[in-house]
DNA sequence: CGTCGTCTTGAGCAACTTCAATAGTAGTGG
DNA sequence: CCACTACTATTGAAGTTGCTCAAGACGACG
């Protein structure tokens, strides 16, 4: 099943088998993206939303000089732009990071889906609220932490999110973010991101394999402290909430 | 009608008269808050959501040293924590800024409301997505702008939002934010916020009445340029989108 | 084998913080 | 009415963090 991860990561127990199949059936088609390929441009009207089967995406807003602020990262099991379903246009651009495979859902199909199954409307709503919660944490990250803390926090978030969808073996970190990406997501320059990574390396918190270009997390606990990372905002037990919150409409 | 502003600001034409009345009828009671009074604590389970009739609220996350990051501001016509309806607990604290009057909606009443009127579920979803869009813009603001730009952007956003709900006469700015609040919302120190305001004053962009403690915006256009403020993310014409997006379910 | 993207490092500079002190204003109680 | 307190605004001086500009190294890829 294509949307298998959705069950795993964002609401492990919140979906019935029948509902999961209904979501799968609502897929219009599947597309593949090259690394760094642009998918959606700010402001343009959209008629479909995307769900990540494999790969990773970023959402970003450019400043007046053309420099990029990454405002969100999406991993397998995430909707990329479900908010475009009610909003019809996006306030940011969307790019692939790695090569990715996305399921395409036409909005009219989604509309039918939730007309028939109000419970799925709640599930989708919840999913977009999870994005909002991560946004808030990013505001905190940028507003209150220094460069080290910002990088550490971001790493912790990605680790935890990949873990929640079962895409993390050991502590290796195959996430395709360059140091420039980390910088653009953390409100610092690439130069400074590099120096920050060196610091984290020297302290023995992580390592960077020169050959495979893969990051290894050595001391996640220290990273969490440095980034003041408390994973509650990821609502990892969200499934439970959904179950109780919507117990009256389970399927 | 108590929720009159909601129609005005966030979806001017998206609600039928009958729907607006149904929302009003779903109000459990109305509460008043003192300035700076705490309403909700991060993590605690909640069974109701609040809607601002009058006043203003802030949502914030504290860092390890107890310093506060404001992650969102709410004005009349906004839901304060509608996301707690699907999520059941919040990832941040909620405080009043000014003395405020809030309508209280018990979640079970909201549930009944949207069970009977699926269209209202979309309206509420849209409302929380608007918060997410503002969050993203704040990430941009903190990540890409310097102190001057951050303050300018925040002022522009507040002006525009108050304007959208008809709570802005002239360019006076009765919003009850202290310089410390601006600092806590902008990721800078209070000292530096003060110096930044002085700069903006000296440049003739705004003024601050020493007696009434009221801010006057003199040159909004320049503030917009300084803050790279483009109001599209506020979806001011959201009403239109809602109308067309959900044309199939107008009431 | 050259080119490109990424990582790395240095030196000087600007923005912002920290710590500290002063002053105005509003509210409170005597 | 005044003293007292609390909060907010204001300013100075010194210190840090992070930025800018510049250059070099390294691996991947065609």
Image (cartoon, coloured by chain):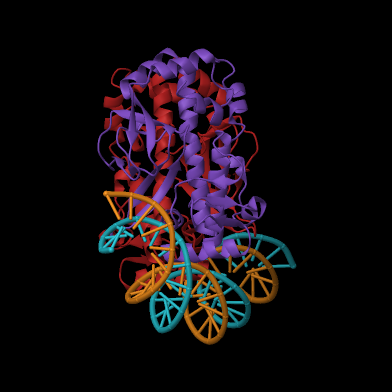
Chain colours: A purple, B red, C cyan, D orange
Residue A203 position in % (x across, y down): 63, 63
Residue B243 position in % (x across, y down): 28, 26
**Image quadrant of residue B201?**
bottom left
Residue at x 43% of width, y 24% of height:
B121
Q: Nearer the viewer, residue B38 or B32?
A: B38
Q: Nearer the viewer, residue B75 or B91?
A: B91
Relative to B138, say whether A126 is above or below: above
Q: Is residue B160 visible?
A: yes
Relative to B17, say whether B30 is above or below: below
Q: Is residue B115 visible?
A: no
Give left or right: position of B245 versus A116. Answer: left
Q: Nearer the viewer, residue B209 or A46?
A: A46
Residue at x 60% of width, y 45% of height:
A171
For the image, the number of numbered tags is: 0
Residue A53 position in % (x across, y down): 43, 30
Give left or right: position of A235 versus A190. Answer: right
Residue A196 position in % (x across, y down): 52, 64
Relative to A91, say whether B1 is above or below: above
Relative to A142, say whether A50 is above or below: above
């Amino acid at each position: 099943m294509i949307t298998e991860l959705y069950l795993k990561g964002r609401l492990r127990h919140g979906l019935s088998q029948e509902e999961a199949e209904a979501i799968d059936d609502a897929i219009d088609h599947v597309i593949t993206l090259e690394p760094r390929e642009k998918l959606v441009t700010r402001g343009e009207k959209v008629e479909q939303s995307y769900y990540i089967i494999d790969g990773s995406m970023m959402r970003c807003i450019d400043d007046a000089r053309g420099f990029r602020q990454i405002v969100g990262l999406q991993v397998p099991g995430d909707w990329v732009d479900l908010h475009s379903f009610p909003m019809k246009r996006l306030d940011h651009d969307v790019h692939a990071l790695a090569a990715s495979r996305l399921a395409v859902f036409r909005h009219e199909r989604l509309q039918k889906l939730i007309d028939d199954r109000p419970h799925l409307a709640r599930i989708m709503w919840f999913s977009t609220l999870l994005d909002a919660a991560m946004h808030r944490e990013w505001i905190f990250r940028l507003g209150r932490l220094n460069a080290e803390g910002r990088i550490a926090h971001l790493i912790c978030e990605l680790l935890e999110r990949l873990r929640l969808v079962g895409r993390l073996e050991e502590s290796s970190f195959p996430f395709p973010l360059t140091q420039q990406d980390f910088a653009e997501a953390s409100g610092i320059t690439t130069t400074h991101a590099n120096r920050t990574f060196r610091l984290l390396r020297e302290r023995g918190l992580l390592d960077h394999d020169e050959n495979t270009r893969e990051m290894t997390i050595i001391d996640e606990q220290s990273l969490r402290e440095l980034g003041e990372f408390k994973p509650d905002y990821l609502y990892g037990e969200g499934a439970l909430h959904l179950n109780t919150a919507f117990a009256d409409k389970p399927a």
